[in-house]
RNA sequence: GGCCCCGUAGUUCAGUUGGUUAGAACGCCUGCCUGUCACGCAGGAGGUCGACGGUUCGAGUCCGUUCGGGGUCGCCA
């Protein structure tokens, strides 16, 4: 039982309002800012909840003398009386701006060195400095509110899934390395010299085994580890909302996911989402947007000109069209004013995605300007303009290449055009979309074999089962991704629950029987003991928090993130270990530092 | 691994064509100030110009290497 003594209970700084006027309160927090007027000292006192002004007057000389020594970020406890501020001294920018606390007693709980950057400043500070002193950066209200936002979102997700009958179950972090997928983080075994655990890239197999075990509905908010290069939206350790359900079809998983997101959105923003989300097949997404994670907040869709230019005099187009390639373009509405230089920089931009060139047509009132116009008859040109729905003032941009290159180049060009023309603002509504009917396999030139697009446990569509062996490229999977504003938020699939099918897929992926037995024997065995049909989905929690909190980087929503070179600048991890530690693990270092 | 951007005071930045003692603002320190709220005023301290090497009579500035941070391509089943 909490024993409350009048006047001694701590009040949160941000909660000191008019209703408390006249009462004796205790505040604890950090000195945010100090304004010393010689005869009167104002301190903005900060805690998690916000700021309140506390006032020191010289009528209490001991306390006043103590107050003169206060500096930024000192931790203090004050007790005093809540008073209305005098006429004209109200601060409308603070929720506590109508009142102030007149201090009767002050206790310095801790002093503080001058911080390397001011907590109370609005100034942008170099991220390396912020990361080295992450605990100070996290003191800043902006970052702190994002971490608290994350907590509220996670809480909502847990509540929702619990309400839907899901059981939260932990799975091991020390697990075994499996082929395919991302590079593993390895943990050497002391007990078994020369053997390694792998940190999970996701709890995929374990959650399937929990379905075999009969839990029916599982979830976990869980760290996953992938040793790949970092990006603005990628960290080597990240958190998934991992979900698996038995006896379901894709629609059931999608319904659940939509319900969960909408509930969470309502919890953190007060409004539900507009569900169900629209759906696009993978094929349509690639065709219209050149991407399997299209940003639907704007148009600029890809237009296919392959047929139209197949017999044109422009060799670059016609030869590509006749040899199985694609000629596609984008109508950059109203971009006819782009300078030659801007168009050149767009050409440079698409080059990094493999496009060998970027043809263009500037559409004028009665004529077109274009280096390629001379290769087309007037009729061909008119058909081209009609297909592009071109109007005066438009700029048409074309790429001719293999389908995958065209998609990559134009898909990214589309995003670049939207950025350059300011098509997306903070007010642009969010666009969610499911991408469905993914191909099961894709041929890897590098490995000279088919690899799974999703993962090797994904179920093919029933009708495609016969094609797995002879025509893998045609097989579609029961897989689905959820995309928000061009970012993949999550993805999942219905899994294979019959052993022979799983064996067939492993074979199609070129895994030998021995390898399968060694690495996936336990899975195949499990499937043969009455595994129910099951499927699920996993969401990137960090990305969801990042997008919903309008953060620029995933680092802003992770309390202790790593740099692009996967370092923790605060603890200086990773770091060498002692020779004794290596010896215990039977490891030897072969590079000099 | 490739490409691009950045690195000057504690912080944010300026620094001309390579030229004398590298500046500003904020912060910090000292003093003054009884109604401020990004308080004000006066004074002061504070620099391995990321590091190393080169060119030059002379380098913050030019060149090379390297370290660190960021973005991106590859990579991320």
Image (cartoon, rainbow, N blue to C red):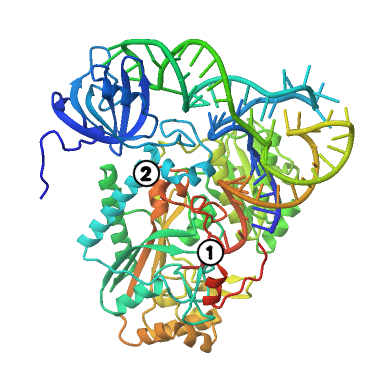
Q: Is residue A353 left or right of residue A414?
A: right
Quarter occupied by residue A498: bottom left
Q: Is residue B15 left or right of residue B77?
A: right
> Could you say which quadrant of the image residue A346 lies in?
top right
Q: Nearer the viewer, residue B38 or A238?
A: B38
Q: Are marks 2 and 1 on the same chain?
A: yes
Image height check: is A193 above or below A11? below
Chain ID at mark 2: A
Residue B75's spot in the image, x, y percent? 58, 64
Q: Are marks 2 and 1 in contact (CB under 8 Å)?
A: no
Identify the residue position indicated by label 2 in the image: A146
Quadrant that contains the C terminus of chain A? bottom right
Residue at 23% of width from left, 21% of height from top? Answer: A98
Say the numbered circle drawn on residue A547.
Answer: none
Residue that mark 1 sits on? A227
Q: Residues within 10 Å of mark 1 (few under 14, many from 20)?
A: some
Report x, y in % for residue A575: 55, 60
Task: Examine the image and state in which quarter residue B32 appears.
Answer: top left
Left or right, residue A398 beside residue A568: right
Tell me residue A27's x, y (percent).
Answer: 23, 34
In this view, A469 is above or below A180: below
Give the Cα distance between marks 2 and 1: 26 Å
Q: At x 59% / y 36%, what residue is drawn? A: A394
Does the image show residue A296? no
Q: Earlier in the sequence, mark 2 or mark 1?
A: 2
Write the residue at 36% across / 28% down. A70
B13 in relation to A201, above or below: above
Q: Nearer the viewer, residue A475 or A365?
A: A475
For the residue labelled by badge 1, is the local secondary structure a helix, a strand or a loop?
Answer: loop
Q: Position of residue A351 (x, y in %)?
A: 68, 50
């Amino acid at each position: 039982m909490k024993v409350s003594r009048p006047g001694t209970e701590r009040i949160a700084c941000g909660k000191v309002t008019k209703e408390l006027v006249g009462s004796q309160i205790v505040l604890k927090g950090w000195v945010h800012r100090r304004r010393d007027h010689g005869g009167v000292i104002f301190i903005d006192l900060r805690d998690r909840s916000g700021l309140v002004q506390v006032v020191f007057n010289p009528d209490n000389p001991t306390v006043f003398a103590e107050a003169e020594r206060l500096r930024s970020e000192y931790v203090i406890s004050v007790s005093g009386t809540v008073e209305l501020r005098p006429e004209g001294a109200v601060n409308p920018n603070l929720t506590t701006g109508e009142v102030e606390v007149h201090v009767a007693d002050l206790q310095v709980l801790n002093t503080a060195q001058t911080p390397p950057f001011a907590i109370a400043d609005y100034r942008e500070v170099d991220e390396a400095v912020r990361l080295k002193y992450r605990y100070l950066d996290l003191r800043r209200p902006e970052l702190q509110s994002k971490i608290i936002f994350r907590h509220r979102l996670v809480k909502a997700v847990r509540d929702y899934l619990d309400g839907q009958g899901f059981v939260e179950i932990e799975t091991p972090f020390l697990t075994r390395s499996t082929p395919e997928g991302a590079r593993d983080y390895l943990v050497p075994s002391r007990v078994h010299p020369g053997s390694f655990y792998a940190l999970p890239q996701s709890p995929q197999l374990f959650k399937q085994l929990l379905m075999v075990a009969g839990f029916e509905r599982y979830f976990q908010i869980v760290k996953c580890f992938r040793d790949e290069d970092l990006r603005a939206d990628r960290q080597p350790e990240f958190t998934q909302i991992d979900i698996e359900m038995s006896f379901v079809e894709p629609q059931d998983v999608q319904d659940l996911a939509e319900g969960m997101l909408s509930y969470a959105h309502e919890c953190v923003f007060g409004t539900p989402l507009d569900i169900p989300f629209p759906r696009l097949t993978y094929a349509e997404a690639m065709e219209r947007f050149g991407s399997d994670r299209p940003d639907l907040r704007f148009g600029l869709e890809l237009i296919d000109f392959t047929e139209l230019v197949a017999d044109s005099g422009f060799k670059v187009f016609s030869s590509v069209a006749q040899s199985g390639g694609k000629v596609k373009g984008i109508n950059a509405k109203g971009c006819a004013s782009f300078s030659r230089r801007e168009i050149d920089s767009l050409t440079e931009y698409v080059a990094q995605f493999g496009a060998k060139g970027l043809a263009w047509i500037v559409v004028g009132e009665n004529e077109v300007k274009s280096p390629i116009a001379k290769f087309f008859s007037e009729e061909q040109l008119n058909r081209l303009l009609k297909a592009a729905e071109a109007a005066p003032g438009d700029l048409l941009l074309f790429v001719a290449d293999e389908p995958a290159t065209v998609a990559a180049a134009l898909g990214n060009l589309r995003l670049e055009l939207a950025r350059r023309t300011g098509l997306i603002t903070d007010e642009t509504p969010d666009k969610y979309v499911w991408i469905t009917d993914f191909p099961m396999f894709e041929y890897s030139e590098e490995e000279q074999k088919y690899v799974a697009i999703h993962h090797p446990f994904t179920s093919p569509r029933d009708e495609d089962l016969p094609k797995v062996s002879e025509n893998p490229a045609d097989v579609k999977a029961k897989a689905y991704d959820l995309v928000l504003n061009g970012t993949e938020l999550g993805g999942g699939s219905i899994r294979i629950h019959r052993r022979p099918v799983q064996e067939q897929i492993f074979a199609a992926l070129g895994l030998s029987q021995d390898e399968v037995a060694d690495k996936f024997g336990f899975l195949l065995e499990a499937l043969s003991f009455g595994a129910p049909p099951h499927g699920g989905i996993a969401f990137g929690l960090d990305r969801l928090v990042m997008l919903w909190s309008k953060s620029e980087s995933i680092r802003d929503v992770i309390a202790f993130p790593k740099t692009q070179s996967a370092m923790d600048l605060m603890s200086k991890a990773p770091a060498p270990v002692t020779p004794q530690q290596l010896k215990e693990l039977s490891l030897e270092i072969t590079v000099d530092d």
